[in-house]
Image: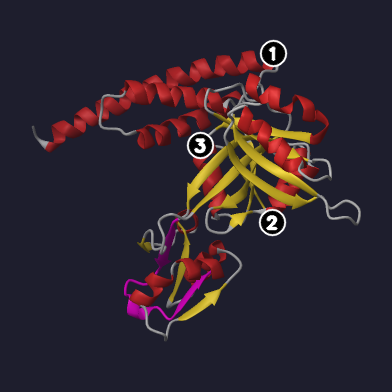
Amino acid sequence: MALEEYRKQIDDLDNRILDLLAQRMEVVKQVGDLKRKTKATIYRPEREKAIIDRLDKMNKGLLNRAAIEAIFLEIFAVARNLELPERVAYLGPEGSFTHQAAESRYGAMSTYTSLNSIEAVFETVKSDRARFGVVPIENNQEGVVQETIDLLGRYDLNIIAELPLAIHFAFATEEENLKSIKKIYSKDIAFRQCSAFIEDHFDKGVELVPVNSTSTAVKIAKEEKGAAAICAHIAAKEYDLPILFENIEDSGENSTRFIILCKGHFNEPSNNDKTSILARLEDKPGALVTFLQEFHKAKINLCKVESRPAKEGSNFKYIFYIDFDGHFNDRRVQKVVKNYWHNIKWLGSYVKLV
C-alpha cells in the first residue's frame, strides 16, 4: 500500500474520532446541565479512574495503559470545562513542576493561576477565586513539604486527589554547539541532581548560575547568548526554548507527590483509596502507639506518619499527619476512628496512586 493511502486511512479515522468526541461532548453537556440543577459534584476522580480501568481491561490494541490515561485525562479535562469552566491555582511560577502536575490532570483548556506561595494557593481556593489548588506535599528525595502539612491543619479544605510526578530535567538552549555555552542557569537543587551530566559535558570554565526557579532560568537562557537552562520540560515548552537533552538527572527515581485541594468536596469510594487525616492526641505516654495499634488490629496499612509541632502554647506538643489505605467511610476505618472523633481532622479520601 502506498504512503498516501495510509495517510488517507489515518485522515478517515481522525474524522471518525472527531465525530465521536463531538457526540461524547453533547452527552457531557447534558450531564452538566443535570448536575447544575441537582448541585451534584462535577469532578469525580473515582469515576475517571473507573473509566480508565475499564478501557485498559478491554484494550486489545497497541496502546498501553499510560497512553490510554494520557489521552483520556485530556478528554476528561475538556469535558469538565464544558460542564463547568475550571480555574486551577498552583504554586508557581509558570513552567514549574507544580504547573506540569496541574496540567497533567486538568489539561490545556482549564484556566490556570500561578501563585507565589503555598499559602496563597490555600487562600485562593478558600476564597473561591479558584475551584482547585495544586501544591507539593512530599518528594521522595527531600521528604515532606512541611508548610503544606501545617496549612492542611489551618484551612478547611479537602484533599481530593494525589498526583505523583516523576521529576525529569531537560537541558535547553538556543545554542547548537555545547562549546558555545558559557553559563548554565537553574535552581541549586537542579545543579545537584544533574551533577553527573554537567561533569560529563562541560569543563570547569562553564559558570553555574543559581536562580529562584527553573522558569527564570529558561527566560534568561532564551535572551542571553551563550546561555543554557536546566529546567522542567514544560518550562522550555512554555517559553519556546529548544531542548537539546531530556532526562539529564542523575537518578531516575526522583519523584514528587502533589495534592489537589478543593472546598467541600467528597469522593465516593473507588475500592482503591487512600485517606489522609491529622491526629491531635492526648499528651501522655503511649498515646500515639495506642492509636496506631488500632490500625494494626484492623489490618489497615499505614502509608505515612509524620509529626509536626502543634504551635499552640509554650509546651512541646505535636499533631500527626497520617496516610492510610482505605476510604474514610469503610467499616474498618470507622471502627478505628470512632473513639477518636474529637482528636481527628479528616483531610480527604481519594483514589490511591502511590
The crowding category of the residue bearing disc 2, from other C-alpha atoms within 10 Å (few below 14, some 14 to 19, many at least 20), is few
* Residue at image coords 14%, 31%: 5
The residue at the far left in this view is 1
The three-letter amino acid code for the residue at tag 3 is: Leu
Q: Whole-percent x and y of residue 88?
A: 63, 40
Residue 92 colored in magenta in the image: no
Image coordinates for residue 320, horizontal then vertical, percent: 72, 44
Q: Which residue in the structure is indicated by mark 2?
A: 116
Q: Are marks 1 and 3 in contact (CB under 8 Å)?
A: no
Residue that label 3 marks: 353
- Which residue is at 30% across, 33% downward? 63
Element class at badge 3:
loop
Q: Nearer the viewer, mark 3 or mark 2?
A: 3
For the residues labelled 1 and 2, the Cα–Cα distance comes to 36 Å
* Residue found at x 56% / y 43%: 102
* Of residues 241 and 63, the one drawn nearer to the viewer in this rendering: 63
Disc on the earlier residue, 3 or 2: 2
Please state the extent of the stretch shown in magenta in the rendering: 168-187
**Residue lying furthest front:** 285
Residue 148 lies, with reference to residue 300, above or below; the image says below
Which quadrant holds the N terminus?
Answer: top left
Point out the frontmost of discs 1 and 3: 3
Pointer 1 or 2: first along the chain = 1
Question: Which residue is nearer to you in this view: 143 or 4?
Answer: 143
Q: Amino acid at mark 2?
A: Asn
Q: Which residue is mark 1?
A: 38
Residue 185, visible in the rendered structure: yes
Badge 1 amino acid: Thr
Whole-percent x, y for residue 149 in the image? 70, 48
Question: How many angstroms separate mark 1 from mark 3 (CA)?
Answer: 30 Å
Q: Report if the CB atoms under discs 3 and 2 are less than 8 Å apart.
A: no
